């Protein structure tokens, strides 16, 4: 069945002017603890959860959200007949590996069901270890051996971050840093101002079963009767960024939210196990004297983000088009560091999503079913030029829950925001996340993972691929549910609160995900999978030389594969799609530039040689990593010089200058002193012999 894609408009975003504010603080962290997960702790992983659902007439946040769900049903009646599929040219993703999150106890397999809800988070290392956390439990898997990685199957958050049995541990978030080859785990402890804490944990090696460095940040950082809720994290080259919400206890939802804050943390200190974490806390973040709520950090598309960006929206509104883009400029040691806040109007509106429908859902009751919460941003990535993000939303035409996919351009100026809505004729989608799956830096290909449910399909896990120019693919079902979920006495069940997903950084087309499904026991369980992009093309440049260069009658012909609408240039002059250059001469050095519609670029330099004939010189091996051999024949005795040039034509070294005899000759040499890259060899004889060859040195 086809998904719904509301067509992107071409109108630019509209900037909204208003006063923005923020404050900066430095907060002392508690000194590091070294926690060894291999050491057993007297931890029963006990967790106390209140399952009582509030009344919609109450004054809590959840009560308010329930009233918004009722308004959404009134504003957008559920009308599947209004579904109009949009054609797509994108092939669907492929499932490379798919497995149940489970563990062995007493020789029996059990689902890792965690708490309520799952709070799925996932990270995967370059050496193939997949680590997941669901609520208060962690689990690891070795994708190379297809075995669980933790010896005892699962570990509690406490076994990694420390603490006592008096602490309630929840809301985990995981990241893997491919440069440091280390893991980061952040989670919360307790929910009162006196006891609220943030655990920030850094692995000491790339093995999550080795010791971790555990730090504590205060959940009431300004000592003003607040506690911390709903964390999200990202990393740049040097820093960890953590966003949380500050909550005032025992007051109404209208005044109980005291803003979202940003922790900026020295990442190297954490990986080194320094005694404390240097940090900056950005607080009182407002636009127009109104708190910006639920800031979501933007992760790097290919690893660490090039800069610290954050997204937010008006997540409680029935319909809205405002997207906030925040940017922290400067590092921790920069006294001029600032927080820039922009807001733009997206061309497509979003809104609070309705609850997801199960087989046992009362379809006349907008408060029953699987909870979708609000329309906050749930996943975001950047390549330094664009930001792509996903959120929950209502699908206006059908009244079902769908996915809002947005793209932000001009991220360092006044941002432009373009959005689309992905829906389905029968399913509700919930809790999406996003990962980059392009195999070139200039790609904008992404994978979107999500939960789904319907009155005829049990809660399961799906994915959609979105190409460079082809839009979202047909959805695939990664895991079909085995039963509906029923863990509450009430008619509403928890479904989120987030979805784990990360690109495997050294496998550019692969993303791992962890989503929610209903098992046979009507419990919420987790399914883990690796999905791959269907696009394997890479832009490559092939150059063919024909004709005689000796008399300036050679012809160079370009052939580019894997490009989208390429443009060519020889010698700085556009070719207007002729792809060829005539009348080139021997020894001529010609720069070549190709750029396609995605922004992919190739720069190369051709040194024109004689047209190759059977009796002409041969160079081998090429490419090479150490020694190289050139064989050639001289018609008469003469003095030879041989020199190495770089790509710009600058002479690096004359490697030979001596007499040579007529007949077959062989020149052997090494470029071991030079770095890998492209070079040119030029041999010239005093009697007129010349030979030029392009050399490619590869890593040893």
Image: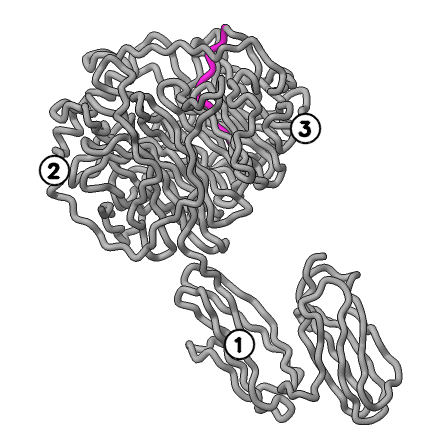
Left or right of 524: which side holds 637?
A: right
Of all residues, the one furthest to the right in this rendering is 659
Check disc 3 and report the residue beneath it. 272
Check disc 2 and report the residue beneath it. 79
Residue under the image location 62 percent in, 20 percent down:
38
Distance (Cα) linking label 3 and label 2: 56 Å
- Percent x, y of residue 527: 39, 32
Nearest the eye: 599 or 661? 661
Majority secondary structure of magenta residues: strand
423 w.r.t. 697: above or below: above
Distance (Cα) linking label 1 and label 3: 50 Å
Left or right of 25: which side holds 67?
A: left
Left or right of 65: which side holds 637?
A: right
Residue under the image location 54 percent in, 8 percent down:
164
Residue 669 in view: yes
Q: Earlier in the sequence, mark 1 or mark 3?
A: 3
Which quadrant holds the C terminus? bottom right
> Which stretch did the figure color magenta?
166-174
The local secondary structure at tag 1 comes to strand
Residue under the image location 66 percent in, 69 percent down:
647
Nearest the eye: 303 or 16? 303
Check disc 1 and report the residue beneath it. 570
Q: Earlier in the sequence, mark 2 or mark 1?
A: 2
Q: Earlier in the sequence, mark 3 or mark 2?
A: 2
């Amino acid at each position: 069945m086809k998904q719904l894609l509301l067509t992107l408009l071409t109108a630019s975003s509209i900037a909204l002017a208003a006063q923005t504010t923020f404050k900066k603080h430095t907060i002392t962290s508690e000194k590091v603890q070294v926690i060894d997960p291999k050491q057993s702790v007297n931890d029963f992983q006990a967790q106390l959860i209140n399952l009582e659902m509030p009344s919609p007439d109450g004054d809590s946040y959840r009560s308010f959200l329930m009233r918004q769900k009722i308004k959404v049903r009134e504003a957008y009646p559920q009308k599947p007949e209004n579904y109009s599929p949009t054609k797509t040219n994108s092939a669907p993703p492929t499932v490379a590996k798919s497995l149940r999150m489970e563990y062995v106890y007493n020789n029996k397999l059990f689902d890792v069901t965690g708490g309520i809800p799952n709070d799925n988070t996932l990270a995967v290392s370059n050496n193939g270890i997949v680590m997941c956390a669901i609520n208060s439990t962690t689990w690891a898997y070795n994708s190379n051996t297809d075995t669980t990685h933790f010896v005892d199957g699962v570990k509690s958050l406490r076994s990694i971050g420390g603490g006592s049995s008096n602490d309630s541990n929840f809301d985990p978030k995981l990241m893997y840093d491919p440069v440091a080859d280390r893991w980061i785990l952040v989670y919360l402890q307790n929910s009162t101002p006196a006891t609220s804490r943030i655990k920030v944990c850094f692995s000491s090696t790339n093995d999550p079963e080795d010791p971790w460095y555990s730090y504590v940040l205060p959940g009431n950082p300004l000592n003003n009767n607040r506690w911390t809720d709903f964390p999200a994290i990202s990393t740049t080259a040097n820093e960890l960024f953590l966003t949380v919400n500050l909550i005032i206890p025992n007051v109404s939802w209208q005044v109980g939210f005291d803003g979202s804050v940003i922790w900026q943390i020295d990442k190297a200190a954490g990986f080194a196990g320094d005694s404390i974490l240097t940090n900056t806390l950005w607080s009182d973040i407002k636009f127009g004297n109104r708190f910006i709520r639920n800031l979501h950090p933007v992760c790097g598309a290919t690893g660490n983000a090039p800069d610290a960006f954050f997204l937010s929206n008006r997540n409680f509104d029935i319909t809205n088009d405002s997207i906030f883009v925040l940017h922290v400029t400067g590092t921790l040691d920069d006294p001029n560091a600032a927080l820039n806040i922009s807001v733009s109007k997206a061309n497509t509106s979003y809104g609070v999503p309705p609850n997801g429908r199960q087989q046992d859902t009362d379809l006349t009751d907008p408060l029953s079913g699987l909870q979708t919460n609000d329309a906050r941003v749930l996943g975001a990535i950047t390549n330094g030029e664009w930001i792509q993000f996903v959120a929950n939303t209502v699908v206006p035409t059908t009244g079902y829950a769908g996915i809002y996919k947005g793209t932000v351009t001009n991220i360092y100026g006044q941002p432009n925001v373009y959005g689309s809505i992905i829906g389905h004729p029968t399913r509700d989608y919930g809790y999406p996340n996003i990962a980059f799956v392009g195999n070139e830096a200039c790609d904008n290909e992404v994978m979107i993972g999500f939960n789904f449910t319907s009155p005829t399909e049990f809660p399961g896990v799906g994915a959609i691929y979105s190409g460079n120019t082809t839009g979202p693919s047909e959805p695939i079902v990664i895991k079909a549910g085995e039963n509906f979920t029923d863990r509450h006495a009430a008619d509403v069940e928890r479904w989120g609160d987030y979805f784990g997903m990360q690109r495997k950084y050294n496998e550019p087309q692969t993303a791992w995900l962890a989503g929610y499904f209903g098992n046979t026991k009507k419990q919420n369980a987790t399914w883990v999978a690796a999905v791959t992009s269907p696009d394997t093309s890479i832009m490559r440049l092939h150059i063919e030389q024909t004709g005689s260069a000796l008399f300036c009658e050679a012809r160079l012909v370009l052939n580019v594969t894997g490009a989208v609408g390429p443009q060519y240039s020889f010698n700085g002059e556009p070719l207007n799609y002729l792809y060829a250059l005539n009348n080139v001469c021997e020894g001529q050095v010609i720069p070549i530039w190709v750029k396609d519609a995605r922004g992919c670029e190739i720069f190369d330099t051709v040194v024109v040689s004689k047209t190759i004939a059977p009796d002409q010189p041969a160079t081998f091996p090429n490419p090479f990593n150490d020694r190289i051999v050139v064989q050639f024949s001289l018609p008469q005795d003469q003095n030879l010089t041989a020199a190495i040039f770089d790509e710009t034509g600058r002479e690096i070294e004359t490697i030979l200058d001596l007499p040579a005899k007529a007949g077959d000759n062989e020149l052997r040499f090494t470029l071991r002193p030079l770095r890998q890259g492209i070079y040119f060899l030029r041999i010239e004889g005093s009697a007129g012999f010349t030979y030029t060859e392009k050399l490619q040195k590869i890593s040893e």
